[in-house]
Image (cartoon, helix red, strand yellow):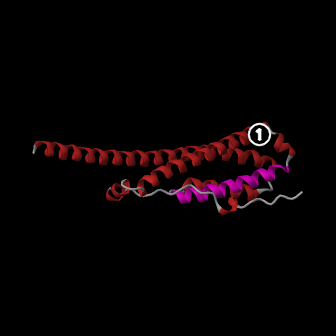
Amino acid sequence: MSLIIIVIVVIIVIVIGTIIHMYNNLVGLRNRVKNSYSQIDVQLKRRNDLIPNLVETVKGYASHEKGVLEEVTKARAGVMNASSIEEVSAADNQLTGALKTLFAVAESYPDLKANTNFKELQNELSETEDKIAYSRQFYNDVVLKYNNSCQQFPSNILARLFGFKEETFFEAPETEKAVPKVEF
């Protein structure tokens, strides 16, 4: 009789230990998702801090390109005011497009391209864009692990029971997914 009780107690301890482990794993993954998203925020803020300096530098050389400068400023404000992952992603994509237009305009101004301040800002923005891309990739990797834990048996039972919700991936806009047409 006592052997049966010991076996039952051991099984109960193993089950409880497994549940605690799965729960802690879900919490850890959810926190990694939040942390990785905040790393994207850090890089977006860094880029947003660089943009006013870039716009001011370009203004001095390309004052008649007012529409482009306003678009960059408007897109920057959109990123700063976005709150959800979807809003940040959309606003960030709009800002990236506006910056591409700004750099294309800068190509028409040799003096601007030669300006050391502009070159430094352009290099810093390029480095920041690389960091943003890496942060997005890391975020998506963490979201994948977390979402897998929320969907796979048996942790999906605990995820539903304790209200763990799947997270959204950071996705590129459809315009950037299209294959570019190259002509010679």
Q: Amino acid at mark 1?
A: Lys
- The stretch in magenta equals 84-108
- Left or right: residue 53 compared with residue 164: right
Figure quadrant of the C terminus: bottom right
- Left or right: residue 40 compared with residue 157: right
Residue 11 location in percent, x, y? 23, 46
Residue 39 location in percent, x, y? 53, 44
- Determine which quarter of the picture holds residue 172: bottom right
User: Which residue appears at 41% of the width and 58% of the height?
Assistant: 165
Task: Name, please, the residue furthest toward the left.
Answer: 1
Residue 164 location in percent, x, y? 38, 56
Residue in the foreground of this view, choosing between 9 and 50: 9
Residue in the foreground of this view, choosing between 154 and 177: 154
- Left or right: residue 136 compared with residue 5: right
Instruction: Please determine whether, in this image, residue 48 is positioned above or below residue 162.
Output: above
Task: Name, please, the residue furthest toward the right.
Answer: 184
User: Which residue appears at 56% of the width and 53% of the height?
Assistant: 80
Residue 91 location in percent, x, y? 60, 58
For label 1, the residue is: 119
Q: Is residue 74 visible?
A: no
